[in-house]
Image: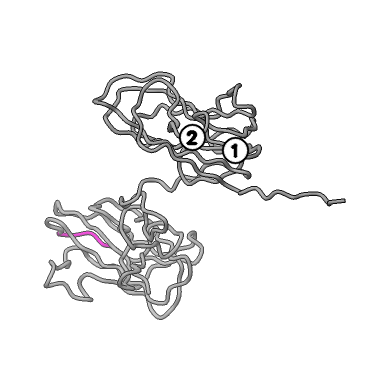
Amino acid sequence: MSGPTTVGTPANQCFFSGTVPLAVGVLNPANSPNNAWDVGTAYQYASITTVVAGTPTSFTIVLEGSLDGVNWSTLATTTNVAGETQFATGAIPFGALRARCSAASGGTSPTVTIVAVAYQNTPETVVGGTTPGGGAVSQGSANTLANAWPVKITDGNNLAAVSFNSGTGASQLFVTTGGMTAGTSLTTATAISNGTALDFGSAARCITCVFTSSGTTSGGTVNLQVSNDNAFWINVGAALNASTFAASGAATLTTNTITATPVAFRYARAVIVSTITGGGTVSATIQDS
């Protein structure tokens, strides 16, 4: 007496229509048995991919499945005239597949190539239609800075510039060069005020604030303040008088900068101690290391 027989079933089966005219009717090639693709045994999942030519204005193509070759059920539908991939829900088992065009219009002798795939297990996709099970994953549009993939090193605007810390506006580390860029604390200010507090993320042992003026500044004083808790602030040395600020190329460490070193602080900000006079304004950037 012979024992039981086990029949192996391929995990996936792929079928091609070749390039066929886009017209109402079954699109399977004539040499497929009964104009259907026989998958051999019952499958549950399927997908249909269309490659379209001839610029049709509209069409409806359905991927149909059947267990007896007579009664057909719709597994997936595609209407994208640019071509696409659509997936069956997995709710209808089938032993045969066929692609059928139920409506078509426009275009110049339009054609379509059909790729149908039968799956034993839930397919996973990167882009496309509804995927049964796990869901579709989109990597976005490639070749643009904001949507680069699969990996990007960016701060959202500048290529290969990664924020050095999670604070507000502090120095940034440029991955391509390993260099640091300063954060801005004051921008064209004149009134007595505290500039933006920069959070370095951890304690910095050398903090330098560079003050610049625009227009004529005949008076007013500025200073650099540091803090470890962003609440209690300490002035660093004596305030600078805005009237002594020098222009680019003539500025010195005495006229335009205040440095806190070698003590360590996490936060820093520029402050206007007394109102800037003369019609000009003051800006300040802070660099930590």
Percent x, y of residue 48: 48, 36
**SS label for mark 2:** loop
Which span of residues is magenta-colored?
Answer: 218-222
Percent x, y of residue 112: 36, 32
Q: Name the residue at 74% across, 50% down.
A: 6
Instruction: Say whether residue 190 is left or right of residue 199.
Output: left
Residue occupying the far right of the picture = 1
Percent x, y of residue 256: 22, 69
Magenta stretch, overall SS: strand
Q: Amino acid at mark 2?
A: Ser
- 117 within the magenta span: no
The residues bearing labels 1 and 2 have C-alpha atoms spaced at a distance of 21 Å
Q: Which residue is mark 1?
A: 45
Are the residues tagged 1 and 2 within 8 Å (C-beta)? Answer: no
- Give the quarter of the image for residue 214: bottom left
Residue occupying the far bottom of the picture = 262
Viewer-nearest residue: 170 or 40: 40
Percent x, y of residue 95: 62, 34
Q: Name the residue at 34% across, 50% down.
A: 142
Q: Which residue is mark 2?
A: 32
**SS label for mark 1:** strand
Q: Is residue 58 above or below residue 50?
A: above
Q: Is residue 251 above or below residue 232?
A: below
Q: Name the residue at 58% across, 24% down.
A: 73
Instruction: Say whether residue 15 is left or right of residue 107.
Output: right
Viewer-nearest residue: 68 or 249: 68
Identify the mark at residue 261; answer none if there is no mark: none
- Give the quarter of the image for residue 273: bottom left
- Looking at marks 1 and 2 on the same chain, the residue that comes earlier in the sequence is marked by 2
Instruction: Say whether residue 13 is left or right of residue 206.
Output: right
Q: Name the residue at 16% across, 64% down.
A: 243
